[in-house]
Each structure stands twice: as structure tokens, then as C-alpha cells.
Image (cartoon, rainbow, N blue to C red):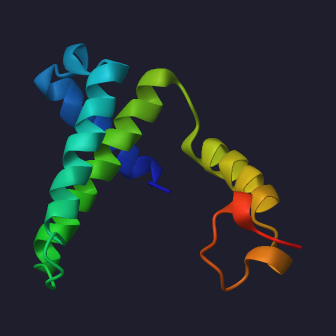
Amino acid sequence: MPTPATLAALRAFVAEREWDQFHSPENLAKSISIESAELLELYQWGQEPDQERVEEELADVLTYCIHLANKIGVDIDEIILNKLEKTRAKYPVELAKGSMTKYTELKP
């Protein structure tokens, strides 16, 4: 997870520019999707993309995710661990290990 120093740097960056007024949950969610598409575009034709560009687009996606979490008041670690527990229940190791089958299709 982002360190407290990284979170503080992101908050300061936005505050210095007075951008928080533009960061509604809706706008942040849209930005996550847009930046994710830019990341995906780097892999569009199956080529090995430039690592620096991948890192920049990934940073954009993560930054908007952090901003959204802050805006809606959720703890990133907590929501990830909660989701992991739900996913663990849907994909038990004994049924899902080594398989990419959707949980609704897993057979005991």
C-alpha cells in the first residue's frame, strides 16, 4: 500500500493546485477508467510496451484509485482485505488452484 509519505505527497499536490473541487467520486471513477484504457492500449496489439510508459499509466490509475478512496472515506487496506476474504470464499484453493475457471463453474 502507499506509504504515509506518498499519501501526503498526493494530498499536497492536489491541495497546491486546488484540484479537490474537481475530484467528485464520479469524476475520479471516470478518470480511473480512462487511465486504465490508456494502460490497456499499450498492450493493444500484443507487443512489448515501453516499460516507462507502462509505469506512468499504472501510476495514473493507482493515483486516481487513491484519490477516490480518500474522497469516499475508505481505508484502502481494509477494503482490499475484505474483498480478498470474499474472493477466497468464492475460489477455494482445492477447487481453484491452477485453474482460471469462473467461480460459478467450479466443480467439487
Question: Relative to the observer, which residue lies in front, 48 or 46?
Answer: 46
At x 38%, y 42%, the residue is 65
At x 39%, y 50%, the residue is 5
**Residue 51 percent coordinates (x, y):** 16, 79
**Residue 48 percent coordinates (x, y):** 16, 85
**Residue 46 percent coordinates (x, y):** 18, 81
Q: Quadrant of residue 87?
A: bottom right
In the picture as drawn, the residue positioned furthest to the top comes out as 21
Question: Relative to the observer, which residue lies in front, 46 or 34?
Answer: 46
Q: Is residue 7 left or right of residue 60?
A: right
Question: Relative to the observer, which residue lies in front, 44 or 85?
Answer: 44
In the picture as drawn, the residue positioned furthest to the right comes out as 108
Q: Is residue 101 left or right of residue 38?
A: right
At x 22%, y 13%, the residue is 21
At x 75%, y 50%, the residue is 86
Q: Is residue 104 left or right of residue 51?
A: right
